[in-house]
Amino acid sequence: MKILISACLLGEDVRYDGENSSIAFGKDFTFAEKEIFMDILCENEIYSFCPEVSGGLATPRDPAEIVNRTKPFIVKNKNDEDVTINFLIGARNTLDLCKNEDIKIAILKSKSPSCGNEKIYDGTFSKNLIEGQGLTAKLLIENGIKVFNENQLREIKLLLDY
Ligand code: SF4
């Protein structure tokens, strides 16, 4: 099975702060969760991708949040600069990759304004989480791709049935 995974979850230093969100080395994951993740990596064809870097943003970069969650979307960074176009290009590039490679499953980083599949920050930079999706996760889901986050590894395991 082909699976797209947020590059930061695979240990690439592409996060806004120049760090990563590695599952394999993350202290927030149990040994059992790491084992499931390693099984997923070993048993499948993995595509590592960062929508924000793909959309032309530098690393490190200022953190950004979605300030208008309905069309027309508006994404701004903490300096009030409009980075919407970068987020939209990144989302489009991610979908293009999935379509070109026939990828039907993605594991994306939770809470990100690009990758979050269930919750995102509310656009006020006050650490307030709300129900919602990042622009990339939203576009993938709208196009029939199953999107999970790093806290749903057991659900992915069930889906992959091993
Ligand atoms: S855009 Fe996605 S892959 Fe890139 S750093 Fe943010 S959460 Fe990770």
Image (cartoon, helix red, strand yellow):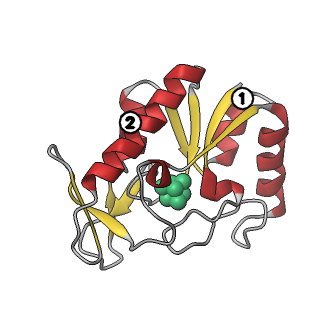
Residue at the (54%, 21%) spot, across then down: 100
Please state if 134 lies on the left or on the right of 79 as rendered.
right
Which residue matches tag 2?
92
Label 2 to label 1: alpha-carbon separation? 26 Å
Left or right side of 113 for 97: right
SS at mark 2? Answer: helix
Can you tell which quarter of the image residue 156 is in?
A: top right
Residue that appears at 29% across and 76% down: 78
Queried on whether the Cβ of the residue with tag 2 lies below 8 angstroms from ligand 1, the answer reads no
- Quarter containing the C terminus: top right
* Circle 1: element type: helix
Q: Is residue 9 left or right of residue 74?
A: right
Residue 49 point in image, percent of width and height: 58, 45
Residue that mark 1 sits on: 160
Disc 1 residue type (three-letter):
Leu
Residue drawn at 26 percent across, 78 percent down = 79
Q: Is residue 115 left or right of residue 74?
A: right
Within-10-Å neighbours for mark 1: few <14, some 14–19, many 20+: few
Query: Of the residues under marks 2 and 1, which one precedes in the sequence?
Result: 2
Give yes or no for contact between labels 2 and 1 (Cβ–Cβ under 8 Å): no
Can residue 109 be seen here? The reply is no
The quarter of the image holding the N terminus is top right
Give the foreground label among 2 and 1: 2
Residue 102, horizontal then vertical, whole percent: 58, 19
> Which residue is nearer to you in this view: 150 or 101?
101
Q: Residues within 10 Å of mark 2 (few under 14, many from 20)?
A: some
In this view, 135 is above or below 9 = above
